[in-house]
Image (cartoon, grey):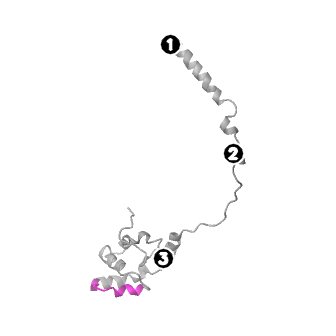
Amino acid sequence: MKRFASILAAVLMTISAWGFSGINSAQAGNLSVFTMQSSPIFAARRNAADDKLGEIKGKVDLNNSDVRDFRSLRGFYPNLASKIIQNAPYTNVEDVLNIPSLSEKQQERLQANLENFVVTEASDVMNAGYDRYNPGVY
């Protein structure tokens, strides 16, 4: 039985070694005759979201930011941030002070953080699905 197993192993090794000699048929086929010559397009790809983020420069955009973006500002998340989002869009930063039903403390917080806000035009790229409360970032 040992002799049969060793002969079988030798035969299998010989047969498999034939596959490693010479040029394989897959390498020998030239498929370039079936493809058309293409030329590259030298246009820079622009990402609209990156353009918008470059425009706001690290500030909170009142028309495009979601509730989570207000976490960096103390006392804004989630109540005051929700009021700001509910009353959007804004034409300038000072419009945020005209939100109805703000308490005096909330008015003071807004006044103290006006330099942290920016107003840009509302963008579909930043407001995908128009859900600024739960943007799906987990």
Residue 96, magenta (yes or no): yes
Label 2 to label 1: alpha-carbon separation: 48 Å
Q: Residues within 10 Å of mark 1 (few under 14, many from 20)?
A: few
Report which quarter residue 88 is drawn in: bottom left
Residue 73, image x, y percentages = 36, 75
Q: Are marks 3 and 2 in contact (CB under 8 Å)?
A: no
Q: Nearer the viewer, residue 89 or 72?
A: 89
The local crowd at label 2, few if under 14, some if 14 to 19, many if 20 or more residues have their Cα within 10 Å, is few
- As drawn, 41 above or below 28: below
Per the rendering, the mark at residue 56 is 3
Q: Residue at x 40, y 87 (%)?
A: 94
Q: Which portion, as a residue range, is magenta?
A: 93-105
State which mark lies toward you, 1 or 3.
1
Decide which of tag 2 and tag 1 comes sooner along the chain: 1
Dot 1 falls on a residue whose secondary structure is helix
Checking the image for residue 96, the label placed there is none
- Specify the amino acid type for callout 3: Ile
- Quarter that holds the C terminus: bottom left
Residue 44 vertical position relative to residue 116 in the rendered view, above or below: above
Q: Amino acid at mark 2?
A: Leu
Image spot of residue 110 (x, y percent): 35, 83
Q: Secondary structure at mark 2?
A: helix
Residue receiving disc 1? 2
- Identify the residue shown where x is 31% and y is 85%: 107
User: Closer to the observer: label 3 or label 2?
Assistant: 2
Residue 97 image point, x, y percent: 35, 86
* Residue depicted at x 36% and y 72%: 67
- Which residue was labeled with disc 2? 31
Q: Residues under labels 1 and 3: Cα distance?
A: 78 Å
Instruction: Give the alpha-carbon distance from disc 3 to disc 2, as whole Å.
Output: 50 Å
Give the total of numbered labels. 3
On the rendered structure, is 28 left or right of 87?
right
